[in-house]
Amino acid sequence: MTRQKTSKWNLHMIGIILTLAWPTMLEQLMQTAVQYIDTAMVGSLGTQATAAVGATTTVGWLIGGFLSSIGVGFLSFIARAYGARDKEAASQAVAQAVLAVLFMGTLFTVLSLSLSGVIPVWMQVDPSIRATASRYFFILYIPMLPRAASIIFGTVLRAAGDTKTPMKAGILVNVINVILNFLFIYPTRIVTIFGSELVLPGCGWGIIGAAAASAIAFTVGGIRITMVLWKHPLVSPRGQTLKPDIKILRPCLRIALPNMLQRFGTSLGYVTFASMINSLGDISTAAHTIANTVESAFYIPGYGMQTAAATLAGNAYGAGDKKRMDELAGMFIPLEVFLMILSGGCLFLFAPALMDIFSDADEVIRLGAVVLRMVAVSEPFYGFSIIMEGMMQGVGNTKEPFFYNVIGMWGVRIVGTFLCTQIWHMSLISAWACMILHNLLIFVLYCICYVRKKWNPLAKL
């Protein structure tokens, strides 16, 4: 291939990458914006309110991790099927994804609601806010079935190259959530806009109103994405049997199981990590909750690119195109690292101002700004890990990421945080330092994997 043709091909591929990535980035940006608004609204109710909402957040990550891991299994299978131009196999896999949604959604509905009363106790939440945290969690996880549909069906659509439909569904969820938050959280009040007084109706439900708004929005989003999937020209399950098909489920589960164990291990680690932070008191819990919310916006470029990396790597693997696999890695990694340097720089510069949006407590703002600036420095390293994990998921290699993440989470973050906060009685800053060391270890392990080409199953061909 001549230099001119190579340059044109690279520009063409970068165009494809950005076409796949931008809807996911916009979807995540909208989700983060709503999370910012939620946190700011709840934060206006006081530090205890913020702590009550944030105290069970990591349990939600645990549940979402299970569902996302199922989606990863279907993503790899469908992306490879499309790369091999086997549309029938892809449609059969979508039908099995419908069964997965029904089973997993029902299972997690029962588990979430039945355990809502004891989860705040397990999380070492302050006794004064346990009842509120429990009610918030119960209401938030009533619509687990539509939430499962949003996660798994969204992944199925992205695997087929359709990133716009999940984006549109996500925007719908977020708009509904914001509108209902204004109506449910606050009481009826008079506001002045451009010199005119307006009466804004409200229920005055506080934290419970925030949970109800989110639950309704998730329900609408799940129904919407299910309807679109059913009518979709590429991946509709219509005409396919909805009985379990072991020929489809076996390879999907072979990929999903290590990813599920990884997410379970890391999410359980997040729960343990958060419970130790909760034991430090309301100030640390509130600062940690808000800093997590702020930080999530700056991972958007990383995870948006990860979706594109997984899809295109799966397509190349399905087509047996070794050269394209290497070229994709050569384009994704520099682009990702550049984006994460920009986002990390912005996070470092604006950390105090971002914390100030969500809290009026000076102690919370100062503490949150310190930990945000610490983690900002590690963002480019984490970006590399995100891309490598995405490409490995696309080709069905989920075993190495499982070992890397579990070793980093439990061997560094949890052990280190336990020693720092529970034995040596150090502050939230020490816990975030352990988190950064965890991310750096993951980076080193993925670097070794990349150099040795263990991520690419076509490298030995």
Image: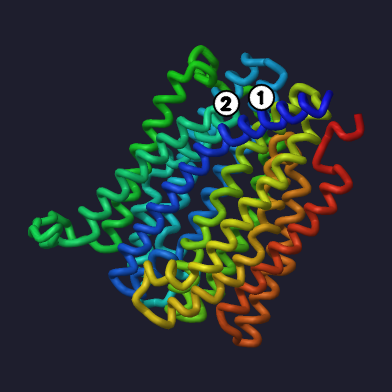
Residue 39 image position (x, y, % from top left): 37, 62
Residue 179 image position (x, y, % from top left): 26, 48
Locate the N terminus and report the quarter of the image it occupies.
top right
- 395 vs 430, left or right, is right
Q: Which residue lies furthest to the front in this view?
A: 4
Disc 1 vs disc 2: Cβ atoms closer than 8 Å? yes
Quarter residue 218 falls in? top left
- 143 vs 453, left or right, is left
- Frontmost residue, 356 versus 359: 356
Q: Residue furthest bottom?
A: 424
- Amino acid on which disc 2 is placed: Gln
Callout 1: 10 Å neighbours few (<14), some, many (20+)? some
The mark that comes first in sequence, 1 or 2, is 2
Residue at image mark 1 = 248
Res 225 seen here: yes
Q: Is mark 2 on a helix, strand or loop?
A: helix
- 426 vs 361, left or right, is right
Image point (37%, 79%), residue name: 361
> Please, is residue 129 above or below residue 31 in the view?
below
Image point (47%, 34%), residue name: 166
Residue 51 image position (x, y, % from top left): 40, 71
Res 258 seen here: no
- Amino acid on which disc 1 is placed: Ile
Q: Which residue lies furthest to the top in this view?
A: 239
Q: Is mark 1 on a helix, strand or loop?
A: helix
Quarter residue 268 falls in? bottom right
Image point (64%, 66%), residue name: 377
> Please, is residue 89 above or below residue 119 in the view?
above
> Please, is residue 161 above or below residue 361 in the view?
above
Residue at image mark 2 = 96
Q: Distance between the residues labelled 1 and 2?
A: 7 Å
Residue 149 image position (x, y, % from top left): 46, 35
